[in-house]
Amino acid sequence: KMLVPKKNRLEVYRHLFQEGVMVAKQDYALPKHPEVPVPNLQVIKLLQSLCSRGFVTKQFSWMYYYYYLTDEGVDYLREYLHLPEEIVPNTQKKTNRPQRIGAPRDERGGRGERGDRGAFGGERRGGYRRDDKEKGTAPGGGFQPTFRASAPGLGRGGGAPQA
């Protein structure tokens, strides 16, 4: 168990409650956390304690800890910080997003049958994808391919090397 000054604990808890999430680099020697004026080790240990009690969920990726506040954590921090019910973390606030203005879409929400590419993207590729069946270049039903090795015994299925 690590002893953390109450001032630092309150700083970390306020920031976590305000944002709803917190990121900490896995660098225990870092003198200060980038977002909170508290040593990084204390931030990690405080959040580790909250995680063990089920108040935050932790995810680790590419040398960074990502902590997400749970509903129980919101209740706990609200009681610990003596905050009213009206105040919620930023991750739980509802935002009014403006309507997106963009290309017109058909009734299904797409950009058309083939998007803006045309049929098979033929204009841009110079007709790269062609249907070989139209031209009669596909092999017939009696086609029997043969595979000959340049030297016997080499490759797959060539048999044992001759001695």
Image: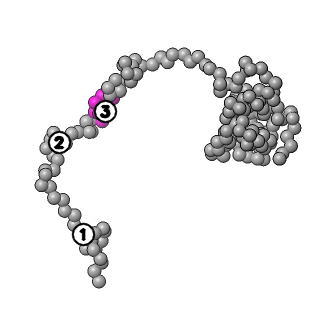
Which residue does the image show at 29% across and 77% down from the upper left? 160
Residue bounds of the magenta highlight? 116-125
Question: SS at mark 2?
Answer: helix
Question: SS at mark 3?
Answer: helix
- Write down the quadrant of residue 121 in the picture: top left
Compare marks 1 and 3 and give the one earlier in the sequence.
Answer: 3
Which residue does the image show at 13% across and 50% down from the upper left? 140
Looking at the magenta stretch, what is its main secondary structure? helix
Could you give the CA–CA distance between mark 1 and mark 2, rounded to whole angstroms?
A: 33 Å
Residue 121 is marked as: 3
Compare marks 1 and 2 and give the one earlier in the sequence.
Answer: 2
- Write down the quadrant of residue 86 in the picture: top right
Which residue does the image show at 65% across and 22% down from the upper left? 93
Q: Amino acid at mark 2?
A: Lys
Could you give the CA–CA distance between mark 3 and mark 2, rounded to whole angstroms?
A: 19 Å
Check the image and report above or below for 59 versus 162: above
Q: Label 2, on which residue?
A: 133
Q: Label 1, on which residue?
A: 150
Q: Amino acid at mark 3?
A: Gly
Q: Amino acid at mark 1?
A: Ser
Nearer to us of marks 3 and 2 is 2
Quadrant of the snapshot with the C terminus: bottom left
Question: SS at mark 1?
Answer: loop
